[in-house]
Each structure stands twice: as structure tokens, then as C-alpha cells.
Amino acid sequence: MTLTALASLHLLALKGAALMGAIVNLNHPAHTVDWEFIHLSLANVIVIGLMLLVFVLALLLPFPGAAKRRESERAS
């Protein structure tokens, strides 16, 4: 690649970063959840909650094809 091509790619990347900065305003204090000695950002609390939900669903929901395996075991 030539130097001008690299410069134009760099300029496009900067424009893309400026556009993303315009979409998401990060110029404010973070939202935090405080419990005694635990301080978490709201985004982390949401991610942890979703992970726990997926874990519980994985424990409760049957595996795909489990009914077919049970039927084939009973038939044999």
C-alpha cells in the first residue's frame, strides 16, 4: 500500500470513530450499583444477571433430542 492509501484509511477510521462518538455520549458519570462494599457499573450488573438467567435456563430446559433418546432406550 502506498502512503496516501494508508493515510486515507486512517482518515476513514478517524471519521468512523467520530461518528460512533456522536452516537454514544460517554461524557457523563457512570451509573453504578452500590451494595455495602460492592460497587459495580450498571452494565456489569446487567451482564451478570443475563449470565445467571442463561445458567438457570440451561439447568431447567431439557436437552434437544432428549425425548427421542428416551424413546429409543425404552424400545430397546
Image (cartoon, helix red, strand yellow):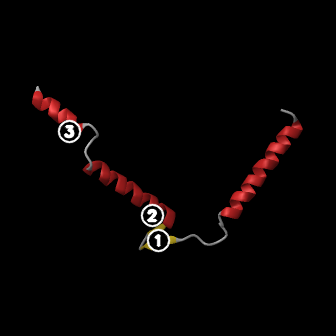
Q: Answer with left or right where residue 24 lies relative to residue 72.
A: right
Is 56 above or below relative to 4? Answer: below
10 Å crowding of disc 3: few (<14), some (14-19), many (20+):
few
Residue located 16% across and 35% down the image? 70
Residue position marked by numbered label 1 in the rendering: 33
Q: Nearer the viewer, residue 68 or 15?
A: 68
User: What element does badge 3 sit on?
Assistant: helix
Q: CA distance from mark 3 to mark 2?
A: 36 Å
Is 31 above or below relative to 63? Answer: below
Residue position marked by numbered label 3 in the rendering: 67
Residue position marked by numbered label 2 in the rendering: 45
Between tags 3 and 2, which lies in front?
3
Whether the residues at callouts 2 and 1 have beta carbons within 8 Å, the answer is yes
Q: Nearer the viewer, residue 37 or 5?
A: 5
Residue located 84% across and 44% down the image? 8
- Indicate the position of residue 6 as horizontal and vertical percent values: 83, 40
Is 2 above or below relative to 22? Answer: above
Tag 3 or tag 1, which sits nearer the N-term? Answer: 1
Among the 4 quarters of the image, the one containing residue 24: bottom right
Instruction: Point out the residue furthest to the top here.
Output: 76
Residue located 49% across and 67% down the image? 42
Q: Nearer the viewer, residue 27 or 54?
A: 54
- Indicate the position of residue 22 as horizontal and vertical percent values: 71, 63
Q: CA distance from mark 2 to mark 1?
A: 8 Å
Among the 4 quarters of the image, the one containing residue 27: bottom right
Q: Nearer the viewer, residue 61 or 52?
A: 61
Q: Answer with left or right where residue 5 lies relative to residue 18.
A: right
